[in-house]
Image (cartoon, rainbow, N blue to C red):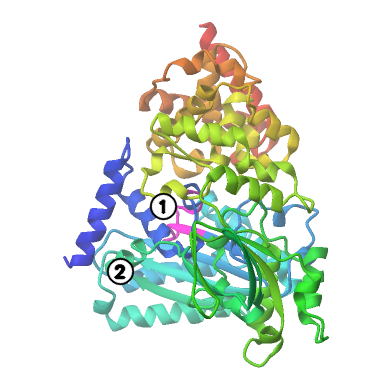
Amino acid sequence: MNNEAILVNQYLKAAQHARETPLPDDIAFELFAAQCVLREFDLSDEEIELGRIGGGMDGGIDGLYVFLDGVLLNEDSGLFADDYKASNVRKNAELDVWIIQAKQESSFTETAFDKLQSSLGRLFDLAKTDEQLEILYSKELISRVRLFTDAWLKLGIRKPLITMHVDYVTKGDCSAAGKAVEHKRSELETFLESQVSGAASIARLVGAAELYQLSSTEPEYDLQLRVAHYVPKGTAYSGLVRLNDYYDFLSDDRGRLRTNLFDSNVRDYQGEVMVNRAIQSTLESYADEDFWWFNNGVTILCSSVSISGDSTFTLTGVQIVNGMQTSHEVHTAVSKSRLEDERWQNRSVSVRIIQALDEEVRDKIIRATNSQTKVHDASLHATEKIHRQIEAHFKAHGWFYDRRKNFYKNTGKAADRIISIPALGQAIMAMGLSRPNDARARPTTLLNNAKDYGSLFNERTDLDVYLWLASVQRRVDTLMLTAAERFVRANLRFHVSCFIATRHHGAAIYNPKQLAKLAADPLNFDLDYVSKVTEQLQDLAESVGKGNDWTLDRVAKSKPFVEVTIAAALEVVSE
């Protein structure tokens, strides 16, 4: 075993040791592999877990992730809504699908590529129905594949730039892989490009050396920005940055947009909306007017600033908190014609650089710079007092509330002690509002509705309740890794927690404040109990499904199943 393999094993061992309940070794390696190869996207642990396949009938695929312009797509992404218009997405948007096979082996085999080619040939065949695919593949894998094929179909008119990425990950040595493996790797690339017309394909071997390098790489938040003209005021600066210099600031070594710079931004990239079309029009113009005359500019927060004699700013802890739409459009426009076009040298964007260490001050700046245009107030949730209070309360009890995405992950805290805002929202929705169907159906959008948001996060709710809800859901999720297969777990995890909370409360729960007394003490339950609850709910789900001709995922998103779940929990109480 080479040094890199030993170091990778040590990393995995340390991560497992930090958990209260270690993961099965194969799952731990699959998650680690996905975190490494998708490092540039700075995904949370929960986002990584959503894309993991594993289990039987997986077609040799252990993870599948789809990105649109660097943003992870999931089943509740707006793109898949019936009324969503393809014109909302810019022409030639980047549509990337990442397929990962991760095996705890010390070598690479050509049969792995054979299995992938066979599976992907069927899975990416648009003529195949779900029913036909279910003969060979799990429903979970098919649902992940549909994220790509549905996006492909919906965006076809916008001519997306599709790239298929296949990463075959082991603890082996890539340089020791034989000619047969290399031939199969190249053959898979050619095959995928024939399957998905116009797409590019990149198949890679990722061994111990690559894993170690990727796991040691942190997102780059310390960057340099050349500011042509600026005015200082204390620890803040206002200036103009040439568009080609701003492009360099936004781009990684491969010319891709550094999406991690927008972790603190309150909105995602909005695509072909009216504002962005206006930005595009201004950028495309060959008139003499400067770009910054017609654009509100960009606000950058950082923890420290140093300035060299040529007006190059070295910024530590960089976050672009306002100007995501502008940044995306500038990056796209300059990347199309950077070498031959002088517009990017002669035109500028207005930039404000603010050094701010205090978190409350940073939050105020984020809110202020995003309140001048229409943004739903729920989008600013991370900056609000209630979330700072939850973060402090969790930390005092050895838990970590990820109010700032991946902040605690990047500081090395144990993964099973980190709770994101969306994850806590789902736990509250499932147990505190008895709506596990909505927690399952809308994992990333339930915070965007003002009524839902007000019910989920309220300063009148005891902070102990939030911690209790987070710990119960995390305990359920951990035990269900053993108690149920992946597809069942994904669909029933919130119904299991709803059942348990209802059972122990002794009545239906419609407000998190009802849990104040129950939250005073930890709720202890074991694998046997969770297994029995899961089995009971599976039987109930099958009954509801047969009565309505629904599949399990449809049942899990339905109100009738919530009603029978709560009724079953209360029947247990009455016995």
Outermost residue, left direction?
1
Residue 55 visible to an observer of this rendering: no
Whether residue 446 is situated above or below residue 123 in the rendered picture: above
Residue 541 placement: quadrant = top right
Whether residue 120 is situated above or below residue 202 in the rendered picture: above
| Mark 2: few/some/many CA within 10 Å (<14, 14-19, 20+) | many
Left or right: 453 as drawn, with respect to 382: right
Outermost residue, bottom direction?
340
- Identify the mark nearer the N-term, 2 or 1: 2
Q: Which residue is mark 2?
A: 207
Q: Give the x, y percent position of residue 562.
A: 64, 27
Tell me which residue sits at (75%, 45%) in the image: 376
Q: Which residues are magenta?
A: 49-64
**Closest to the observer, 305 or 476:** 305
Q: Amino acid at mark 1?
A: Asn
Secondary structure mostly taken by the magenta-highlighted segment of the chain: loop
Whether residue 428 is situated above or below residue 2 in the rendered picture: above
Q: Which residue is mark 1?
A: 410
Which type of secondary structure does the marked residue at label 2 adopt?
Answer: loop
Q: Give the x, y percent position of residue 200.
A: 55, 79
Tell me which residue sits at (70%, 77%) in the image: 348
Residue 259 covered by magenta stretch: no
Q: Quadrant of the N terminus?
A: bottom left
